[in-house]
Image (cartoon, grey):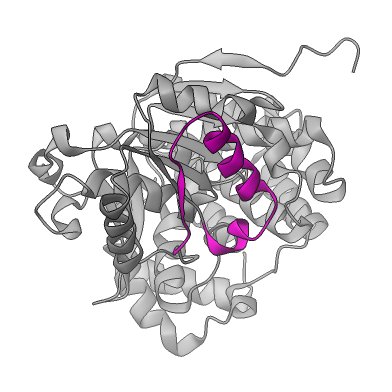
Amino acid sequence: MSNEMELVGNWNYPTAIRFGAGRISELPDACRELGMARPLLVTDPGLAELPMVPAVLDRCRSEGLGCELFADVQGNPVEANVTAGVAAFRAGKHDGVIALGGGSALDVGKAVALMVGQTRPLWDFEDREDWYTRVNVDGMAPVVAVPTTAGTGSEVGRASVITDERDHTKKIIFHPRMLPALVIADPELTLGLPPKITAAVGMDALSHNLEAFCSPFYHPMAQGMALEGMRLVKAWLPTACRQGDHITARAHMLVASTMGAAAFQKGLGAMHAMSHPCGAVLNTHHGLTNAVVMPYVLVFNRPAIEERITALARYLDLPKPSFQAVLEWIMDLREEIGIPADLAALGVTEDQIGQLAAMAVADPSAGSNPIPLTVENLTALFQNAVRGRIH
């Protein structure tokens, strides 16, 4: 450790990030920097029962902030969670949001901050065409994002994924100003993550970086971030799963997560197009589902990405760099950290494939897959992923 650079920094890409162990202590200052006097702390019910959340509330209150708690957030959040958060925001006369938690809490917090100033319904701001221009920007509340998992990277995202219960689809609510104005990325907050959750969210970070890297669109900055993000996952995810109190591993995985979310403005692909319907219909864990479908999608896309994946193998310093080397690394990593081999293990059945494939082809992530997606090829992909046929 003596020759390693200090893991701390103040970054402004894509937004202001205060990164480093112990920096949660700066939360009251961060709130004041954004003009908040009465922030609403949005988190999930599981975190609300841990010592971390009361400690954050106490710190904010001890420094004069009128901070209250909202924790009505599901694992795959729905519109009702956002509506309840908006009601709590207005009832408490709050002036900003602290979004603290994993992707679900961060997404709900960002959506609440958007919706407190709108008169239109939530679904009017879905990421379609120019619908974001409908937003009354002046009514939006500022957000400080505090990630407690290292996977989704929602703290540096300009959107929220919310399930529409009317048709059981995950929809992306988008506006450029939904990007939190300030992030506190404190790896100490991730120390309590159990190994299985660490594995699932870590693979989510890998999927973001990998799909962004494979996306056919041109974005060299995102491409560079995706490469380094994957190197960090390779170097540190097994350690984070094996030694949950390893602060260096936790720090590097938190960065890899942020990098993946910043990189995927370049695009995602079939992993997410398949994962979103599974989460909406079967309530599967998003990162875990991405991890399960990852090798199946990689093999499907091979004709379009082989040269690029071979370059990735060289960057990752894999022996005999090739597409096959990357595939074997991913398969070995999944086995090492306990990722199931197929979608059947997550409860997906053959008779659901038709519905899931139809939803996947309409998913916003589908359009940036390296090979154009159809109901037919997605049906085959789902069949392979359910039956465990990678080749």
- At which x and y percent is residue 317? 76, 28
- In the picture shown, does residue 325 fall above or below 90? above
Residue 308 magenta-drawn?
A: no
| Residue found 56% across the figure and 71% down from its top | 385
**Displayed quadrant of residue 148:** top right
- In the picture shown, does residue 209 fall above or below 378? above
Observer-nearest of 216 and 24: 24
Can residue 313 be seen in the rendering of this structure? no
Locate the C terminus by quadrant: bottom right
Observer-nearest of 115 and 354: 115
Q: How many labels does the image show?
A: 0
Residue 48 magenta-drawn?
A: yes
Can residue 277 be seen in the rendering of this structure? yes
**Displayed quadrant of residue 56:** top right
Observer-nearest of 78 and 196: 78
Q: What stretch is highlighted in magenta?
A: 44-72
| Residue found 71% across the figure and 27% down from its top | 21
- At which x and y percent is residue 347? 57, 82
